[in-house]
Amino acid sequence: MTLIFDLPPENAAQPLRIEVDRLVIAGWTGRDAHAIEHHIGELEAIGVPRPSAVPLFYRVAANQLSQAGSVQVVGDGTSGEAEPFLFFHAGEFFVSIASDHTDRALETHSVALSKQICPKPVARSAWRLADVQDHWDELVLRSWIEEGGEFRLYQEGTLAALREPADLLARYGAGNPAPAEGFAMACGTVGAIGGIRPSPAFRMELFDARLNRRITHAYRCLALPVIA
């Protein structure tokens, strides 16, 4: 899947064009056992079984990635989750944000299939991981959903709540090929404020207060009819 990212002017004058052929969705990536249990509880509340281990790494088809402003989904029971998005290009890692958009009804039967069935929206900007590595824990992840015609804060937390990239990559690397050109990973999420629920529109951002910059993305969901 071809993705195009704008980098900060000091990094590149031209957009970065990459081809992703190996997409991994990392789940249950919290550092705090209580926070992980909270997120497991959120999902159990909507019928999702507990994971077999934490963290887990799901392979998802790379062609599910999308940088469009709208995505098509089946029915009205899907929802997004903002996540840091790592990708490997030209010998180094970059970071952006993605939404692990998921079919919540299907998730109660199979988490792996629920992740595969929905597009994974990705922002159009990225930073060099090396430029934020020393203050990774300070980065703030936020998302908003549309309810009653207004956008409401849905997620907010620093990346200190999630495992660091090196930790996730090391855990994934036990038994899997090493990251190479075309590798990308969504790195987990923070809890939903008020519980997981669907929305026709989703906004997300990754904010770097130290360098005073942010990566943002927004998309709408176009629900296709459920035909029996």
Image (spheres, grey):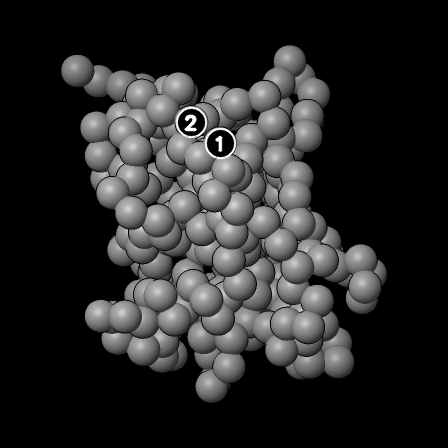
Q: Residues within 10 Å of mark 1 (few under 14, many from 20)?
A: some
**Residue 55 appears at what percent x and percent y?**
36, 52
**Residue 201 appears at what percent x and percent y?**
56, 30
Q: Residues within 10 Å of mark 2 (few under 14, many from 20)?
A: some
Per the image, the residue denoted by label 1 is: 38
Q: In screen coordinates, is 160 left or right of 32?
A: right
Relative height, residue 138 to residue 6 (above, below): above
Asked whether the viewer can see residue 216, the reply is no
Can you tell which quarter of the image residue 131 is in? Answer: bottom right
Per the image, the residue denoted by label 2 is: 41
Relative height, residue 228 to residue 210 (above, below): above
Q: Quadrant of the N terminus?
A: bottom left
Pick whichever, 205 or 18, lies toward us: 205
Task: Please state which amino acid type lies under the numbered disc 1.
Answer: His
Farthest-out residue, left: 228
**Residue 164 appears at what percent x and percent y?**
53, 63
Pick whichever, 167 or 226, lies toward us: 167
Residue 205 tag number = none
Please give the count of numbered marks on the rendered protein: 2
Task: Please state which amino acid type lies under the numbered disc 2.
Answer: Gly
Asked whether the viewer can see residue 175, the reply is yes
Which residue sits at x=59%, y=73%? 129
Q: In screen coordinates, is 176 left or right of 103?
A: left
Farthest-out residue, front: 33
Q: Disc 2 and disc 1: Cα gap in Å?
A: 5 Å
**Image marks 2 and 1: residues in contact by CB distance under 8 Å:** yes
